Image (tube, grey):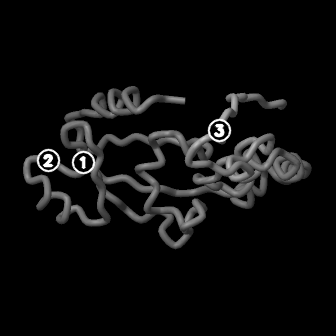
Amino acid sequence: MFSEFQVNYLRSRLRSKTTIKSYMRASMNPDPDHFVLKYIDDYLDDEGLPDLSLSGKTRYFVIQSGDFHSDWSYDALKAKFPNKNPISYTFIPSQLKDNPAMLANNPEYEDALDSQGESERQSLLLGNWYFRPAASTHFHREWCSFVQAPPLHASRVRSWDL
C-alpha cells in the first residue's frame, strides 16, 4: 500500500506538454486507518458504506501547508485558496456484483468472503470503510467502579488473568 507521501510524490510527476490531461487511478480495499479515507469520506454514508448516488461525482481538493481541504465546488475552494489550483478527483466504489465474470468463474468467492472474520467481511464483502473490530472481550473497564480514596489500611494490588 502506498503512503500519502508516495502518492503525492507520484502525483507531482503527472506533467506533460500534450493536450491530454494527465491523471492517476488507484484502487484499494477499505481501510479505516489509511489516508485515502479523508479523500472519500464525503462519498460514504454514516455507517462507512459507499453512497452509490455519489459514485463518480467530481470533488476537488487542495493541500495547503500540508493540510488537506476538499469540496464539491471548484469555485468554493478557489475562493478559499486563491493561490491554489484545486485538483479534481472522484470515487467509484465497486461491489462484488460488479464483476459477474469473476463470480461465474469463482461462484464460491462470495461465500469465502462471507465466512471471514467480521472485520474482513465488513471491509471486503460490504465495502465498509469505518468498521473496526471490537476491542478484546477479556476485560471491560465498566466492570470496575472507581473510588475517591482507598479504604483505610488497604494495600494496593493490581492483577489480571487473561
Cα separation between marks 1 and 2:
7 Å
Q: Are discs 1 and 2 less than 8 Å apart at CB? A: yes
The numbered mark at residue 84 is 2
Crowding at dot 1, Cα within 10 Å, few <14 / some 14-19 / many 20+, comes out as many
Name the quadrant containing residue 149: top right
Residue type indicated by callout 3: Leu
Name the quadrant containing residue 160: top right
Quickly name the residue at label 1: 62
Image position of 158 (left or right of 71): right
Secondary structure of residue under mark 2: loop
Image position of 1 (left or right of 133): left
Q: Position of residue 123 (x, y in %)?
A: 68, 49
Q: Quadrant of the N terminus?
A: top right
Q: Nearer the viewer, residue 103 or 124?
A: 124
The residue drawn where x is 51% and y is 39% is 34
The answer to whether residue 106 is seen in the rendering is: no
Residue type indicated by callout 2: Lys
The answer to whether residue 22 is seen in the rendering is: yes
Residue type indicated by callout 1: Val
Image position of 123 (left or right of 3): right
Q: Residue furthest front?
A: 153
Q: Residue furthest left?
A: 83
Q: Quadrant of the C terminus?
A: top right
The numbered mark at residue 152 is 3
The numbered mark at residue 70 is none
Sequence-first disc among 1 and 2: 1
Image position of 85 (left or right of 151): left
Q: Position of residue 15 (x, y in %)?
A: 25, 33
Secondary structure of residue under mark 1: strand
The residue drawn where x is 64% and y is 55% is 128
What number of labels is visible?
3
